[in-house]
Amino acid sequence: MRIFICSDAAVLSHQAGTFVANVVADNPQTVLGLAAGATPLGLYRELGCHHDQGLDFSAVTAFGLDEYFGLPAGHPASFRHGIEEHLAARVDLPPARLHWPDVRPDADVAAACAGYERTIAHAGGIDLQILGIGGNGHIGFNEPGSSLAGRTRLVRLTAATRRANEGNFSSPADMPEAAVTQGIGTILAARRILLLASGANKAAAVAAAVEGPVTAIVPASALQLHPDVTVFLDAAAAADLRRRDEYQAEAEMLRRMGLLR
């Protein structure tokens, strides 16, 4: 893992935005995996600025990481709505190139999940998967105990995850109990992974994921098994890391060598 510690969330968003913009500039047909949530939204705003400066997203293909089961596509709390509003419309990403799992309540869920995996494979696989991390260490909606080899599937959300997200709904009773998520195996199949974390409430999960053992109890720890993971943290999210000084020294070396892209 390459770990970059930023002074605050604004700097994190700026640096992560530059990172992703460089990926797209190098390969205009990049296949992105997109996470929702507050931290990635800062990144997406930065990508909007890069688009304004001429970065072309018209040939980019994107796949949503996860979505609440049973929500209509236009629901204001759906991840699809958030990505369409804050990224796709902002950078003119063609709607036909933005894919989501089928979460209709009458869908054949197993068949839809298998179909989503086939669609990702047909696109050539994901070049860069963008991730956030939950306070319990989840990535996507892969809750603690998820298989490290799992693929896209329907999952039951834990009480902690529901509490963390229910503020996006008009009442706690409206918060879905389940979601469809790419599995950890699907995530690890991406060629590159970008993990973002901001805030003191993520510090324990970040430390467990980055410096703890690889275990299904901390799903994000599986990222240690991937050969190309870049992590951007703000200072608060990095507070529990034991090797902060070493990570900052490595980042500075990469900058001096012109390898920070």
Image: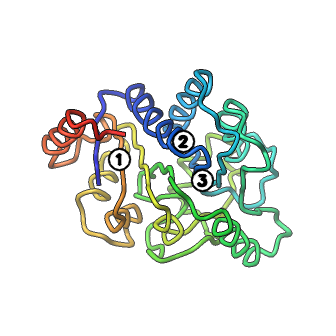
Say which element carries label 2.
helix
Horizontal side of residue 257 vs 151, given as left or right = left
Which numbered disc, 3 or 1, marks the residue closer to the eye?
3
Type of amino acid at the residue the image marks with label 2: Val
Q: Is residue 124 left or right of residue 173?
A: left
Three-letter amino acid code of the residue under disc 1: Val
* Mark closer to the chain start, 3 or 1: 3
Residue 242, percent across and down? Answer: 15, 49
Residue 241 vertical placement versus 116 (above, below): above
Q: Which residue is mark 3?
A: 31
Q: Residue at x 27, y 53 (%)?
A: 207
**Residue at the image point whose x is 65% and y is 38% from the top:** 57
Which quadrant of the figure has residue 144? bottom left
Tell me which residue sits at (86%, 69%) in the image.
106
Res. 70 image quadrant: bottom right
Q: Is residue 194 above or below residue 109?
A: above
* Sequence-wise first label, 1 or 2: 2
Name the spot of residue 22 as percent of width and height, x first. 47, 38
Residue tagged by mark 1?
231
Marks 3 and 2 sit apart, C-alpha to C-alpha, by 9 Å
